[in-house]
Every structure is written in structure tokens, then in C-alpha cells.
Image (tube, rainbow, N blue to C red):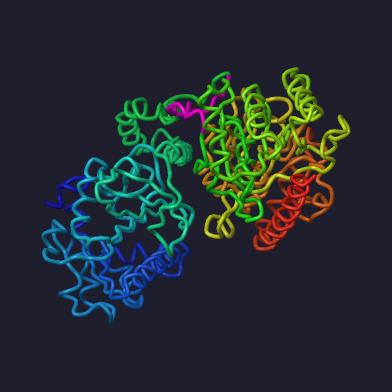
Amino acid sequence: MYKNLDTTADSLQSWKATRGADHRASTLASEGPGTSLYERQTRLLSTLLGAEQRRLGRTLDLLDFGCGFGRLAAPLAAIPGVRYHGFDLSEAMTEPLRLAPPEQVAPVAERVFHGDSPRAALAGRAFDCIVSVSVLGYSPSARIPALLEELGALLRPGGLLVLLENTLVPVSVWDATTRPGRWLHAFASLLPDGWDLHHGTGTVQGQDLYVLARNEGLGRRYFQLVDLEDPRDASRPLAFRAIHEGAFIRLQEWAEQASELLARPEDARVAELSRRLSSETERFARRQRLHALADDLARFRGPRAPPPEVKPPEAPSAPPAPAIQVDAPLDTRWSHEVPRFAGMLHVFHQDWYGIRAAAGYLPGRKLAIPSERTLTRQELRDVLDHVDACLCHTVIVHGFSATARQLVEALRKGHGTSLRLLTLWHGSTAQFPNTLELDLFAQLVELRRKGVLDGLASVKPGMHLLAAELFPRTVLNLPPRLSDTERAQGASVSRAALIPTPNDWRKNFYTNLFAGLASDRLDTLHVTATYRMPEALRGHKRILSVPRPERAALFDLVRRCDLILNASLSECQPMTALEGLALRVPCVTGELGLGALDAHPYQRFAQVVHVDSVERVKGAIDRLLELRERAPSELAEMMADYERALVTEALRVLEEFIQS
């Protein structure tokens, strides 16, 4: 019976006893027609359902699960070619819909249903699409898989189950900060076996979109949902670990907000939250080693004394990566596609995050190698065979190591002069106090002089002054290639910023941190570094320490921020600035020395001359956020224009380097 899928028998009876007219009055007053939430929900569902109807080429049978008084009935029933049906467990709740249905919902006795079990009430009927909007949070997580399977049994082959529910969290928690309380579900973990989950974020504030489809016994699979017109697109697979890293960030934000709401000892919700969080602590340790929520609970109960050093939560360990990764999704998913660079192969190290991103966004094939060990003879043969098989005529090695040298010499010996062999240095002279960096750069110059390398270039301006063997132009990094739906353009103001830099003197972490704390336009700072904050300097803003997320999770975090802070004392071309550019989230940086590009209006807004000045960095924060709040479309167009100019110039210089 359906009552076994609800939170408790008491809540079930309370819902059944509530009059639909009363619930409609209270709901529409806060989030009904005319409000941003309602309009975004309706627009999202209308786009997706309209695309599904056109794909089918016939009438689409739709079930609105948890239809209540019919809030969504009129707009969904009005979609051309969509036949609306509604179900709710409460007869009293559906009374307004049954007494005054939209014109398209007729005859109402055959279109609106109620009962303890959807399968029993809808016996003999099948649907092309089932939608659930803000409904499943009232059922405990232990019952969600069974409910999803019950709804799945009502779908026709190839049908979709569309959930517009809470933002994804890594483990389910009870949210006592809302009245009435509800569950935040970890839908990725609760997905039944044999289903695909397409996950979309950022469309509706406070909610994520989950599109579920059966996959004929292929286990549980995860994909990023990018285009509402194509909700089945499987071209962007997501690793379960990547999903949970992004979900952890969401959970930590919720925990910080909950701490503020529940700080008052007299608030009765503290007891409920404490009970629920205690039951989840063991699951945290077992599944993701996420202890942040338990730390928050401790702060609710006692004084807010910070530890001597603040560390981001430990990220879950990953299985060992293969020694050679060829065209991995991480390295090709956001690449620019330029046919004239099709015969180019980029080689880079798997664990050098920034350089891997820079190489990954460039056009051409991709090969990721280890940095901690050299390659075996068989692995070297595999690389040589791959170069032959993909008909590569140019190889660019990004960064340098003993492994990279081994590979360069093997490629030269194996292919002779038929292969153009280039290297790109991603560092600067400020790194040379590390003698390993100095020695590696010197090795590259020597290999170029000996003719082992056909070309050597740098992403740092002026490096050709060190040795005549260097290409005199500065090679420019590219931003990731994103679709319009992947960008954050038009997102609401969150009053949050991301500081993605490590805590060392070159990256200037503390200046960025204190500038963010000093700005009246920011309430929350996300940081990925380990840092120490004396009590006397803490202030009152939220600082959320997060583990360094994988790239898809990082993009999701950036979308939910207004700004990135990366005003470094020594920098080449920071990848987070380019990723923010593509996502239309501005980034504060120091002067980059990119010639005419530095004179672009966007760069004049974003760059800081005295990066070690908290006052100057704060000034850059305030002027960017003032423009974003006052004229967001103007800022977005300014960034789009800069991106177009950068991409054009970067491809032109890259071609010159290849042909030099």
C-alpha cells in the first residue's frame, strides 16, 4: 500500500485530511503563478515534454505524480500533443482539480486519480512520461527505490521518469529547517539497478532535474543532462565519484545554512536535526568519509571554536588510473573542435590538474601519462602504435618530467623526422627556486638544441628571452567549449565566491580570502585550500572548505558562485579564470601580460595591479559584482566578446607555433 511509501502514518493522514483549496491558498501565496520558482518549473517541464512529444510523433500520455490541487495541470495539459493525467494519495487534496479542471483535462474521472497505491489506482494504464515536482521529499529515503520501481512499472517501454526535486546530496538527510520538514534524497545512490540517471543542475533554484530511463540490464549509469530537447543524450557520462563530490558541496552548503537557522537553543528543530544527523554519521564515514555534517552538529551544541587549522574534507580515494589514457572523456568532453588540428596529439600528465585541463580544451587527440613513474617497454610500444593508428603528424608534450623525456626520445627514435615533436612549458621563472623546475626547463632547451625537439614554446610571456630556441610568441590557453545551456548566464545572485587556489605564497591565498571577507557584496566563500584562521580574524561570513572537486563538479560549483578569486603573485594563464569565462562567472586575477587581450574591457575590470593588496583585490571584487548586479547581460556579453577574441587569437598563435 502507498502508505508504506510515505514518511509516517501520521503525516499520511494529515495530508489526506488537508483540503486542496486550503493548501492551494497557502502554496500559491509563496510559490504559485507569477513567481520565479513556479515559472521556471513550468518552463523546464514544458520544454522537456514538448521535445518528448515531438520525438514520439503522437500524443504523449503524461502522469503528474502528486498532482495535489492541480498546480501544474493547466500548463502541462496545454502543451500541444500532451494528454495530462494526475494522481495523488489524497482525495480531499485533488478536489479543486476535480471540481474545476482545465478544459484539456476531460473527462476528469478518466484523468485524475487518487488512492493509497498508484499502481492499484492506475491499473491497466501506461504512460510515456511521469513527472514528480517537490513530492518525493516527504517519503523516507529507504522507501524511494521501491517507489521509483512502482512508478517505473507504469511507464511504457522507453518512457521517462522526470523528477524535479532537491539538489543532489551524497547521503540522504532529514531537513528540519523547513516547515514541515522533509528529506533531502541522495538520488544517485537510491537509483534502482537497471536505470540511467541524467542529472541537470542550475535551472531551478534549490532543485535539480533527474531524468530516469530503463537501460535493459546495464546496471546503474549516470550522465550529465545538458539539453532539455534531448534528455536521453548519453554523450556526457558521469562517474559516480564525480557526482558525489559535487553533491558533497551541496550538502555542506545546506549544513552551514542549517547551523545559522538552528543556532538558537530554544528552537525545537535542533533536537530533530540532531537525531537525524546522528543516524547519518555512520553512513558518512562508511560511504564517503564526509565528516563535515557531524562537525556542524557539534558546533550547534557548543561554542564555535575553530580548529587551529582548517582542512577541506578528505575526498574519497579513487581506483588506480591506467598508465596510458587515450582520449579519456575528461580530456575530450570540453575540447574545441577545429578540423585543421585533427592530426595533432596532446600528451600531458594525469595528475597535473591545471596543465591537463589546458591541454584537454585544445583541439586534437589526447594522451595522458603518469608523472610518478616511467613507462614500461610495452607501454612505450602502445604509445608508438597509437600515434601510427591515429595518423598523428604533430605531437605536443605539455609540461616535462622524466616520463615525458622518455616518451619524447622514444617518439623521435621510432618515427624519425616524419613526426613533428613539440613541447609547451606551462611554468614561469618564479618557480625556478624549485631546482627541479629549473633543471627540467634546461633539459627542454638542450633537447631543442640537439634537434630531438622541433619546437619549444611557453604560456608565460617573455620566456624566449631565456633562450633563443623558444618560440617568441606566447601560446594562449583556451577556455572549455561549453554549450549555452551549460553556462551560468542569467543565474540569480548567490553572494558567493570561490577561491580555488592552494595556500602558498605564489598563489596569494590569504589576500584573496581577506578581500572576500571585506566585501559587503559577498556572504559565502568556498575554499579548496588548507589554511589557518586565528579567532581574532575570523569575522562573521561563511567559509566553506571543500575538497578539490573533479572538473564537472567544479563547473557546478562555479555556476553557483558570483565570482572566482585568483589574484596570484605569480601566474601564467589560470585555468579557473578561463573556466569561469566559459561559464560567464568572472574571475579576479593579476596582470597576465597577454598583449592586446589585456586591453579588453573585461580584462580591465577583472585584473588587479597590486595583487598583494587586500584593498585593491576588494576593489576588483566590488566593481565586478556591482556590474553583475546592475547589468548582468552587459557583463555576460562583455565576457562572451572576450572569449571570442581569445579563442581566435589562441588558435592563430597555436597554428604559427606548429608551423614554425
Q: Kindly identify the residue that appears in the image at 21 percent across and 44 percent down.
A: 143
Point out residue 256 in the picture as x, y percentages from the top left corner.
48, 37
Residue 325 pos. (x, y %): 51, 35
Q: Main secondary structure of the magenta part?
A: loop
Horizontally, residue 130 falls left or right of residue 123, namely right
The image quadrant of residue 134 is bottom left
Residue nearest the observer in this picture, 636 or 493: 636
Q: Quadrant of residue 615?
A: top right
Q: Position of residue 92 (x, y in %)?
A: 18, 65
Q: Position of residue 523 (x, y in %)?
A: 59, 43
Quadrant for the C terminus, please.
top right
Q: Quadrant of residue 103?
A: bottom left
* Magenta span includes 312: yes
Q: Residue furthest bottom?
A: 103
Q: How many marks?
A: 0
- Image position of 104 with respect to 422: above or below: below
| Lateral position of residue 55 relative to residue 363, left or right | left
Q: Against 260, is 301 above or below?
A: above
Q: Which residues are magenta?
A: 309-324
Instruction: Tell me if residue 592 is in the magenta stretch.
Output: no
| Front residue of 284 and 550 | 550
Q: Nearer the viewer, residue 564 or 173?
A: 564
Q: Is residue 472 left or right of residue 632?
A: right
| 594 displayed left or right of 330 | right
